Amino acid sequence: MLEDKSNVKAWFYLAPALFLLTIFIFYPIFNALFLVFLRDYNYLQGTWEGFTLFENFLYVFRNQNFTQALTNTMIITFVSVPISVIIALLISVWLNSVLKLRGFFQTIFFLPYVTNAIAIGMAFAFLFNQNYGLINTMLGWVGLNPVNWVGLGATWGNAMFSLLVYVVWASLAFKIMVFLSGLQNIDKQYYDAARVDSTKRYRIFRRITIPLLSPMIFYITITSFIGAFKAYTQVIGMFGVRLGPPGNDKSLITIVALVYDALDRSGVPGALSEAAATAIVLFLITLVFTLINMQVSKNRVHYSGGGK
Amino acid sequence: MVLDTVMYGDEKQNRRKARIRFSLVLTMLILFGIFVVIPFYWMILTAFKTEAQVLTSPPILWLNPVNWQFSNFATAMDTAPFLRYMANTVLVSSISTVGTVITTVFAAFAFARLNFNGRDFLFMILISTMMIPGEIFVITNFLTVVELGWIQNQTYMNAILAMTLPFMTSIFYIFFLRQSFRQIPDELYYAAKVDGTTDLKYLFKIMVPIALPTIITITILNAMGTWNAYIWPRLVTQQQEFRLVSNGLRDAFSNIAGRILYNEQMAAALLVTFPLLVVFLLLKKYIIRGVSRSGIKG
């Protein structure tokens, strides 16, 4: 090694980032772990009534909206993630197989990546409008009756369906980008060899494309699960702070929404601890599913030698 | 002879098969492409309709550009100070992006190039915090900005500080940039050292220019992130006119009681979306490059 240790210098370079990270990332982690064990913490006065192990978690579970929030979050995650991963995979394989027009389609499919969640959520809400929306018009073309998707008194099922369409739509672009770049990195030799053996298309897809893309599929699945557990702004975008269709308020509430609900009540003693407890519950749920995910994919992910 | 015709027939059949396959793939791409474009189309179409046209059932699916009603944008701007919101957003986004780029360049340089005690350990700690949901930080960060006196009797300066300071660095971008920096051959560094170049000079004369595409990607993604920020600005701004575009858009068109004027709502949504689309089309290369390389969720 030509270089010697440059401790002082290194910390000087790290200082600006570490200073901010300490205040806004590290300290908040420890503080959340502290808040969650305080009884009736009042931040305005800086007082609390002793410590408690489970009380704040019990507040979370006893919150009248908790079951609804958990159910919604789970449905959003377990419906939107598999569907969007599969659609994105198909689209990227198709995109990769056409030469003509690829650039044009790429631009189209990447567009949703850059859009504002609130603005597009509003557009989706209007697409699903009962009388003036495009969706019901299209249903009319095939002879179906208009559905009250997101309007006054819309059912939970209809509203959830509309939300899921939006969530899937919004999450495609990112996945397609990652898959497509993965496909473009697959060594052409594999396909040439398969062609010499005149292997069937589907077999090539199953035996070459999927295994070689599996690290990316795995990566995307994990990050999408983590992202989907945090669903919130999409609900705000489509339904506003009401978190549900008019007359069915909070029917689409999510776990993250519960955190901000509690934060909005920050002046009330105990509310911040409840927010912290909710966020920690969310973290634990995410962690458990990430671990399950890793366990399940352990033997199915194929890492080609070298590994980058 | 016989063999020739067989092969020829095979070839012909293959070509026909390929053509059918191509048309099928194209059809699917077009169908999904329409699915992706529809919300944009619907937004643009509605933004140019008159109120009577919006309230026509079944809806009008095509508007002749001659009949576009541009006044919706003016009305939308009257409903809420969107220009003000945009100015706020541009300001917040510029400050936080400049801050982020500076802090990440320095930190990534230390992690990629310098040798110091505890480097790998510190890096591992940084990476492991990336799994923790942001809500855990938000709770305490809110208390911190309250403590700093940026919420009570908020001035514009306080609001800008509260919206920017917590976002002046990013572990993910440090990680991302470190990857780019590490690809620069060590020999360059040794050569520079022999020539007596200081680390700081080496960083700015050699490393930053080489890693410029990555830095541009970070700049774009960070700026776009601010443009989309909704939760934190809503939490820490105390006055309407300090808010950012997403908040302004959501608040202006959520009248609980009254009916929504969809053409104005969509005009406002288009105003917010349009700059993003322009940025995307102009800088597509950098965005795709950054996202597909590392998988950043925006």
Image (spheres, helix red, strand yellow):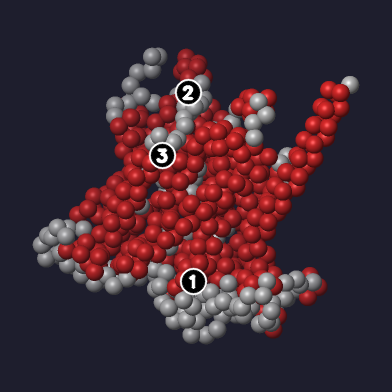
Residue type at mark 2: give it. Gly
- The chain ID associated with circle 2 is A
Indicate the position of residue B272 as horizontal and vertical percent values.
59, 64
Q: Is residue A70 left or right of residue A248?
A: left
Question: Disc 1 marks which residue?
Answer: A159
Q: Quadrant of residue A145?
A: bottom right
Residue type at mark 3: give it. Ser
Q: Are marks 1 and 3 on the same chain?
A: yes
Q: Quadrant of residue A131?
A: bottom right
Question: Disc 3 marks which residue?
Answer: A297
Residue B228 sits above or below residue B129 on the image:
below
**Numbered disc in front, either 1 or 3:** 3
Q: Quadrant of residue B231?
A: bottom left
Question: Disc 2 marks which residue?
Answer: A306
Q: Residue at x 22, y 67 (%)?
A: A59
**Between A270 and A209, the one nearer to me in the picture:** A209
